[in-house]
Amino acid sequence: GQRSLESHKNSSQNFAIVSFQWDHVKKPYIIALWILVASLAKIVFHLSHKVTRVVPESALLIVLGLFLGGIVWAADHIASFSLTPTVFFFYLLPPIVLDAGYFMPNRLFFGNLGSILLYAVIGTVWNAATTGLSLYGVYLTGIMGKLNSGLLDFLLFGSLIAAVDPVAVLAVFEEVHVNEVLFIIVFGESLLNDAVTVVLYNVFESFVAIGPMNVTGIECLKGIVSFFVVSLGGTLVGVFFAFLLSLVSRFTKHVRIIEPGFVFIISYLSYLTAEMLSLSAILAITFCGICSQKYVKANISEQSSTTVRYTMKMMASGAETIIFMFLGISAVDPDIWTWNTAFILLTLVFISVYRVIGVILQTWILNRYRTVQLEIIDQVVMSYGGLRGAVAFALVALLDKEKVKDRNLFVSTTIIVVFFTVIFQGLTIKPLVQWLKVKKTEHREPKLNEKLHGRAFDHILSAIEDISGQIGHHYLRDKWSNFDRKFLRKILMRRSAQKSRDQILNVFHELNLKDAISYVAEGERRGSLAFIRSPSTDNMVNVDFSTPLPSTVESSVSYLLREKAGPVCLDMQALEQRRKSIRDTEDTLAHHTLQQYLYKPRQEHKHLYSRHEIMHSEDDKQDKEIFHRTMRKRLESFKSTKLGINHSKKLNKIHKRDRGQKRRNSSVIPNGNIPSDNPVPDFTLKEKDLEFSESEENNDYETLHLGKGVDFLANVTKQNFTDTPAGIDNPVFSADDDQSIYTKFSPWLSSEDTVVPSQRARVQLPYSPNNFRRLTPIRLSNKSIDSFLLADGPEDRPRSFLPESTHM
Amino acid sequence: VSHSQITRLYSRFTSLDKGENGTLSREDFQRIPELAINPLGDRIINAFFPEGEDQVNFRGFMRTLAHFRPIEDNEKSKDQNGPEPLNSRSNKLHFAFRLYDLDKDDKISRDELLQVLRMMVGVNISDEQLGSIADRTIQEADQDGDSAISFAEFVKVLEKVDVEQKMSIRFLH
């Protein structure tokens, strides 16, 4: 309309070559501009490491929002931008919740589901009821002055301010690394309490609308029933769409490019459908993500999986940024500001106090039934980490001024509460945790021994826990995985994906066997005992890595401490050093090195979920290293048992092998560390080796001269394992690889009974017996993820245990 | 140990026992995925198997797990003359000690300690550093000057550590 009018006007005068069509693009332009501003802000924040260490990003964003709102206000004297509930609920919240659901660590989640549900349902109801009632009680005493609200209004307010907010919680917990159980409980609680919040909110809102006179017992009963309907209904909707999504992803083999699209569209539809049916939309989209993750990840290609992951993180992160910024901006709106000191103060006090009480009570009850106890420090973090956020704000903004007379008061209070929790509690939670942890181990300095053995105990304990299967409710889980295996998989996963998982287990043992046979030669070469003394092999690998290590250790301990921006540093010795100047340096160094490099036991080290990073590297490296080492050792010990079985050796193979070796050695030695992007020629050499030794293939291998063998082994190990300066590496697992590859190749992290074929099996090529040599890991680049290229072979079997290879 | 605990453990035992012959072999343990990424995983597996054998029956399985029962208060006052319960502090420490002491000479030598250290530490530490850490560790604990840690020294140096808590898992009722 506008445009045609203008152009019409213009056309009557002259032809405008270029015209300023502001109104035409106004809406999308402003949206894009805000997104840009938010993202730029993020960049700016992260430039200063010092600031981000102390202040959580959410707080910074709110402050920025306030600032920007102030500018807009000063410029225009109108509050033109604010966080409208529609935008929030339809566009900003779904990506965040989907991200949370899709990357939810399922096993942990369902293992702790009981506790999570208790906190989410009972806890939220408790918070809502107590806060509402107390406020009402205080109101009756008249301190608050004149308000237009009755009991129901207060209860309504209580219900919307009670819910712990997933967005805020996550934002803060990213900074404070807590143990996984605690994390999942708080996180799960913040997600699941949506159902309760929605129900309470709707119930009280309609009660307020129909007036306190008409609220009868029937209505209350209906309210309770609606809770169940809303929550279970929402969940079912989510599960249904998850099923749909998995099914669809099964057939997308030929439309790979749009695979990621399905994930987002179908999940979003689940959200909207639940919203349409007035069920809990958050629950729907959460469970859609939770239930579909396994099947979707199995079905779609690597690239699609990566795309999904990155896009989801990007949208979630972006949405979160925008939310916080707009929270700040929306606060600058004088129209809504109503101040009532008593009300505001009391709200703050009540929500904090009641949360603490609630947490303590519930934990006390739970601890009687839980294997893993929740300690005081966990409870403190849980109470203190109960942040309110944007959901509360959006809900309060939805309130109708006519029905709820004190809407503005509620809005202002909500804003203040949200700001307080996010900024103040977000800021102080990290130091608080630090102080508490330090307090626990404060009075004496742990000795080296204690640290070392303590860590060993942790590992032992996790292992025993795993063995005895005490974590979680296994009966249910076993039943579920049976059901899953028998029915769901057949429907929802691609045939190839199914086969791969089933067969891996079978193939593993066969490979182990063949490996063992093939490694008999090495055993002979080096004497069977040498394998037991495996540290020597490790030593050889480590030799070249004269890394930063000496220098970092020599620098001052406090510098090192500062570098550890993330998790709380619990190194008592190091902390002591800062205070006392006179200390045995060596001692400190030893302590600190140990602290830095000891593998972390399972409870500590997993950063399960992060909005801002694709989690990987550190913990994966640890897992890789340990896994690698374990597998090697197992094979070796398996070998040495096989040693007794295979006795006959033929000597004539030695020379041929030597020649093969020499050829290889000559290419290896001059290079020292083989640059990792040069594998192709290496492998062609290997291929030739293969053909060479093929001719006299049999299952027994010869002893080679000890020296040569050792060199060769050293070179082989060097070549294969020194792709990165970090040490043991493996062509299959390059450090740059996405986590997805790792999870693909280590599906044990997600399911119990698939086992990855030994890596060494893939690596040590020339010694493979007949059928085994068919597996040739050819790495075309550091980033190559489909690492198996099968030489043409008669068997189809090895092919099947590849997880989807797409382009080889 | 209550009846329900035993039943649970038995069902776990049978679910691990893929060969269904009433005993567990090392492969059965190795099938547990988390153990592969536990640095001490293999050693712990070995701890289940009595000397030289390759199979462990349910009784043996239970015995080893019994080390990790939390120490009940009422047990402390029990008859001191009877055999010490498996989950006493001393026995728990002994379990851990056996994990270190591969050659079973009742001492943790420098080499054995180095092995364990190497297992528990990443690959970024050079051997010299590891060696010096090992030396200091032995130094801290060693009282009779034999450059090895005997069981008594092991116990002594860990006297302040809350072993009962660190080496106990609470079985569900």
Image: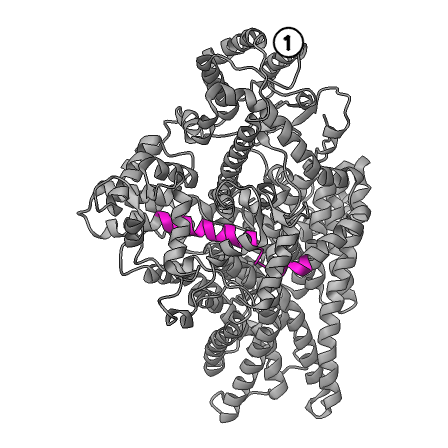
Q: Residue furthest front?
A: B81
Identified by mark 1, the residue type is: Phe
- The answer to whether residue A149 is visible is yes
- The answer to whether residue A100 is visible is no
Q: Position of residue A371 (x, y in %)?
A: 53, 64
In this rendering, position of residue A144 left or right of residue A287: left
Q: Position of residue A354 (x, y in %)?
A: 49, 78
Q: Is residue A58 above or below residue A718?
A: below
Quarter residue B27 falls in: top right
Look at mark 1 in the image and give the residue it sits on: A692
Quarter residue A443 falls in: bottom left
Asked if the magenta segment contains residue A475, the reply would be yes
Q: Nearer the viewer, residue A393 or A717?
A: A717
Q: Position of residue A544 (x, y in %)?
A: 40, 24
Chain under label 1? A
Q: How many marks?
A: 1
* Magenta stretch, overall SS: helix
Q: Secondary structure at mark 1?
A: helix
Q: Residues within 10 Å of mark 1 (few under 14, many from 20)?
A: some
In this rendering, position of residue A623 left or right of residue A456: right
Asked if the magenta segment contains residue A397, the reply would be no
In this rendering, position of residue A767 left or right of residue B74: right
Identified at 54% across, 45% down, the residue is B35
Q: Residue furthest left?
A: A582
Q: Is residue A710 above or below residue A240?
A: above
Specify the quadrant that holds the C terminus of chain A: top right
Q: Position of residue A616 (x, y in %)?
A: 54, 42
Q: Nearer the viewer, residue A628 or A581?
A: A628
Identified at 45% across, 30% down, the residue is A727
Q: Nearer the viewer, residue A600 or A77?
A: A600
Region rendered in magenta: A452-477
Quarter residue A555 falls in: top left
